[in-house]
Amino acid sequence: MPDITVTLDGKPVSLDGSTLRDLITDARVVAARVDGALVDLSSPVAGGQSIVTVKADSADGVQILRHSASHVMAEAVKILFPDARPTIGPATDDGFYYDFDRDEPFSSEDLAKIEEKMNELVGQDAPFVRKEMGRTEAKAFFEQRGEPYKVEIIGDLPDDVETVSLYEQGSFVDLCRGPHVPATGYLKAFKLLSVAGAYWRGDERNRMLQRIYGTAFPVPKDLRAYLTFLEEAKKRDHRKLGRELELFMFSEDLGPGMVIYMPKGGRLRTILEDFEKKIHFKRGYDIVYGPSILRGRMWEISGHMDNYKENMYFTEVDGQVYGIKPMNCLSHILIYKSKVRSYRDLPLRYFELGNVTRHEKSGVIHGLLRTRQFTQDDAHIFCRPDQLIEEITSIIDLVEEVMAVFGFEYTMEISTRPEKSIGSDADWEMATRALIDSLDKKGLPYDINEGDGAFYGPKIDVKIKDAIGRQWQCATIQCDFSLPERFDTHYIGSDGEKHRPVMLHRVILGSIERFIGVLIEHFAGAFPVWLSPVQAVVMNITDAQAEYAASVAEALKAAEVRMEIDLRNEKIGFKIREARVQKVPYMVVVGDREKEDGTVSIRERDGQQQTMRVDEFIALVKSSDPVI
Ligand SMILES: [Zn+2]
Ligand SMILES: [Zn+2]
């Protein structure tokens, strides 16, 4: 074997062997990038190659680890349930899954058994062996193994594909591009999590498969931390808390992805909407309302008929097609166009709590986070190009102000021009520059997502971080060159000529439904006082204070404190516990002493207690209202 020289992690190295394995001895390395491409460590080495090691704890490494775990899981499933037919098993952002076609459902006991078998297979430290096979031969191979899905996948490959790669470990062989960890023993920390239904190829017309979810990490400590995080997330699940706190409900009878706000959820939404109306009005926005059902012609002009039709709902009235709005822009454009606008009239800012309807696939609907109907805190700003930076800056100010009220930290991303886009280079340059300059001017850090903008303009996305570190997309500021053009929108400039205004679409909370879902999970249902649907429960210790309790409740009600009264003939401890389960911020207890002194005894959610006068308590509740 002749000596060859390669670069390994940037340094020249000579090796006396033929594969990457001969070169790389570090046990933390699971694969390598050779001249940019990810490959197995069993790959041959050629002189002059640039080799970068991929460690298990790198982003690529974790993906490879998880994908390899999915193969081991499939092997375990095939051993335990020979009737299960494997389909595909990729890594995901936080784990992996594998879909199986099997008549009987997998139970949680089955999951435990599969995990145990996986541990056994990992203990055997079986190597992952890559093989290349001719297409026809591979098809016959999987046919003979009774795996019709693999046969179908091979059949669907482009005509010019002549060979495919297979990976074998232990008794399992999968059709796969790889790469994989060198051997099953590399899987040191994994866990199976759940089973769910999934359609073959994600298509509702296809057969329903069973998807087993799991996750894997480079070291057990990371896995433990992730499992703790999952537990915490489960406790905060807004769907569970939404039921327990009687905030909202869904009904299959009514239709999937459609939210019904119950009385307490209705209050929460009203508080948010009142807050939004106030803050927007104060910031120079006009509050407007547009209809939900618009003539089909409008959606033709806007381009939705060509680009968004499958996500929309339509209806026919008097022989004419109407589309139910998936966005609020069009009415706002008509308001703008309702008279001749001069450069002196701009900017114009129209705000609407607009209810929009979008046909989301049933598989992606998820509680309040992804619904088919939701309300955006939407606004459209029409301005002159020279006003763009100032307008964007003031939207960012508003984002800052609103997020401070809720206590969210956030990060920003700018998405630039994608390959397929409309508008001139000059427009894109001007708008992208304006977004960047606005953030620079405010001294805010941001990431740039090259080519991730909408086809009609660049945008800023704001992601908030919740109490357990999860990120949620909420505010978006979007420049648009398309709609002003399509609807022939203009203003008369100081030169007496017609000019196109720039249109900004922006939301601050995004979808009110989704934001409520995030708030529930962030606060684990224990909302700040100003947001709590019920701020106080007044409760008496014995019947002797019933009348006094009622008078306290009356005073609170008159001061618009959202309160409930509990005069039931129950032990005070029981009443307090019930209010605590409902996460009510203040329990207002009145006994003989309070009655005599004309005071109330306040217990907070965290157990703190103090006695005060009723007017002092009212002031305490009111002190939590945000100053806007
Ligand atoms: Zn694979
Ligand atoms: Zn819009």
Image (cartoon, rainbow, N blue to C red):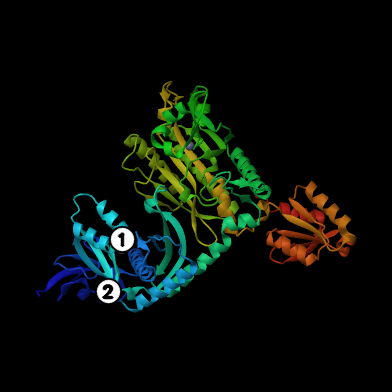
Q: Amino acid at mark 2?
A: Pro
Please rate how many residues cluster around mark 2, counting C-alpha atoms within 10 Å: few if below 14, some from 14 to 19, many from 20: some
User: In the visual, does 226 lie left or right of 20?
Assistant: right
The residue shown at (45%, 69%) is: 111
Which residue extends farthest left?
Answer: 2
Please rate how many residues cluster around mark 1, counting C-alpha atoms within 10 Å: few if below 14, some from 14 to 19, many from 20: some
Numbered tag placed on residue 448 in the rendering = none
* x and y percentages locating residue 315 in the rendered image: 50, 31
Q: Which residue is mark 1?
A: 147
Quadrant of the rendering where the N terminus is positioned: bottom left
Q: Earlier in the sequence, mark 2 or mark 1?
A: 2
Query: Is there any visible trace of residue 486 in the rendered image?
Result: yes
Q: Nearer the viewer, residue 207 or 437?
A: 207
Mark 1 falls on what kind of element?
loop
* x and y percentages locating residue 480 in the rendered image: 42, 36
Q: Amino acid at mark 1?
A: Glu
* x and y percentages locating residue 261 in the rendered image: 63, 46
* x and y percentages locating residue 126 in the rendered image: 29, 75
Q: Nearer the viewer, residue 503 or 578?
A: 578
Q: Quadrant of residue 220?
A: bottom left
Q: Which residue is mark 2?
A: 127
As displayed, is residue 356 above or below residue 268? above
The residue shown at (34%, 38%) is: 421
Query: Is there any visible trace of residue 628 in the rendered image?
Result: no
Ligand 1 contact, mark 1 (Cβ < 8 Å) = no
Choose mark 2 or mark 1, whichever is in front. Answer: 1
User: In the visual, does 125 lie left or right of 264?
Assistant: left
User: In the visual, does 118 lie left or right of 230?
Assistant: left
Q: Nearer the viewer, residue 374 or 315?
A: 315
